[in-house]
Amino acid sequence: MSFEQVQPVDDPKRLLGGRYRLDRQIARGGMAEVWLGFDTFLNRQVAVKLLKPQLVSDTVVAERFRREAIVCAGLSHPNIVAVYDTVEDDGRQSVVMQYVQGKSLRELLDRRKRLGPLLTIHMGAAMSAALDVAHRAGLVHRDVKPGNILLTPDGKFLLADFGIAKALVASGEDLTHDNIMMGTAKYLSPEQVRGKQLDGRADLYGLGLVLYECLAGRVPFLGETDADTALARLQREPTDLAHLRPSLAPQLVRVIHKLLARNPDHRYATGEETRVALMQALSAQNDFTTSMTPPSGATPPKPLRRAMTSDESSVAPIPGQPVLETAVNATPPKNLRVTRAQGAGGWFFSLPASTKFLGLIALAMSIAVLGVATRSNSPQQLETTVAESVVVDQSPVTISRMVSFDPNGDDAQENEAQIWALRDNNAKTVWTTDCYANQFFGTKEYVGVLIELSRASTGVLQVGMKNGPWSLEIYTANGAAPSRLEQWGPRAGADYNTRRGIAQFVVPSEAQFVLLILREVGKSVQCSAKNPYQGVIQDISFNAA
């Protein structure tokens, strides 16, 4: 589903069913148009799916459309687009749904070609949970594909479009027959191609195809025609995903290939079983990437901070809760101190010995103050000691928040869902820009990352660039972070290189906000020949002086 404006409404004063105002068309498909609307009764934005005018006279299509609303209205899950109402107005069927402000996984893959394993796993876990709810309600979706998976700005994945869903137990006249291939050719299960009776495992096969595409950058079966594409899955097994992407953990590869088994009996039996397997693969993937050596020629120095725990990362595995939430806009508690464990991966330089020595002195002073306080039996003395120790903040300065910065873009964000990769201290996870036609971001001229420190400080900002050439700049601010680049004042530093490597910037004056701007980036293998340029950053760290 596309979220770009297509055309304005002809009559903005007219209310659908006397209740819903249609503001603008935001998407269109084969059967229906989707409009951004407004519920005048409940004062909220909604999405209104309208049957196309030329299909109004087709009673079978109209009835199937109406049944979709009834089907979806009975499903309640945070990873399924909610249906609020169904309306027939002037003989035209419509479905009123939750408005999802974001983009489809199809749009994301078209721009990025493939995704990182962690984001892919979380998407798969969310969809597995959504499908499990649908299957337990007696429904098969039959069209699980990237275009029907929506991603919100805060990182939640939702399953949409049950337009060709079918009940596992027939109720009334069947408007879609088993011997007719319903769905999109690239994402059909073998039993759909053969016209066999379906159950929930057909949807799990479709999910396996989506997971495969996210990681490989292409679907496993593709022919010259839709028929060739559909039949290919009956004739051969998919190419081993491990050969296409060696950085994937073997356990993750096994999960996806099990979903793609031609025999439904050899797949996972339920969505919940699939979700559990994916979350177990997440742990295996973390262990696998941590154990891998960095790229040739890159020797990671001793890290300064530990890798973030799942509670601190912006895309965190939550057992039993498949909703993918990002927390990049959340401010951690003031007593949260993020440090890296010895031996973790990452490209960072060690601090000078003098700086380390000052840190040890500060630590010793803190311990001494604590010792005095704990030895005292006087509550008054304890209160006084603690109050005095807060006067001078000796706590480590950490990066408390990072968000993408794209004021010249459509939504002021740039791949926000993957920003967490900049602070996970993992050599195999990256944040990337979108793909561009030239190295200077076209008419945008730049994109960036806004970094907020736990408190104002001087120090060194380090940026691990994974491709080249690159041209970077930094700007600093206090109090509040300006929303436009021209409001940041003079540039605080710049760096350029023709090869991948570490960019270092000295922050000479105390600042709480640092804006990293990418002015030029190199070509990326993840992009198409039409839009080959992409910025790729592994990690960002800040070492206070």
Image (tube, helix red, strand yellow):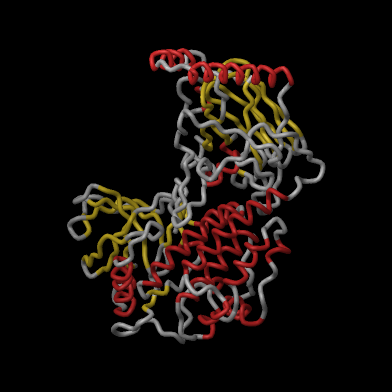
Q: Does residue 412 appear left or right of residue 84 in this picture?
A: right
Compare residues 347 and 389 and report the one nearer the observer: 389
Relative vertical location of residue 106 with respect to residue 263 in this rendering, above or below: above
Compare residues 399 and 383 and report the one nearer the observer: 383
Q: Does residue 430 appear left or right of residue 172 in this picture?
A: right
In x, y percent, where is residue 176? 39, 81
Q: Quadrant of residue 48?
A: bottom left
In x, y percent, where is residue 134? 39, 69
Q: Residue at x 46, y 16 (%)?
A: 376
Q: Does residue 384 appear left or right of residue 211 in this picture?
A: left
| Count of marks, rendered view | 0
Kindly give the residue lying farthest to the right in the view shown: 297
Relative vertical location of residue 135 with respect to residue 501 in this rendering, above or below: below
Q: Residue at x 66, y 17 (%)?
A: 358
Compare residues 517 and 509 and report the one nearer the observer: 509
Q: Residue at x 54, y 19 (%)?
A: 371
Relative vertical location of residue 132 with respect to residue 247 in this rendering, above or below: below
Quadrant where the C terminus lies?
A: top right
Kindly give the residue lying farthest to the front in the view shown: 377
In x, y percent, where is residue 532? 67, 49
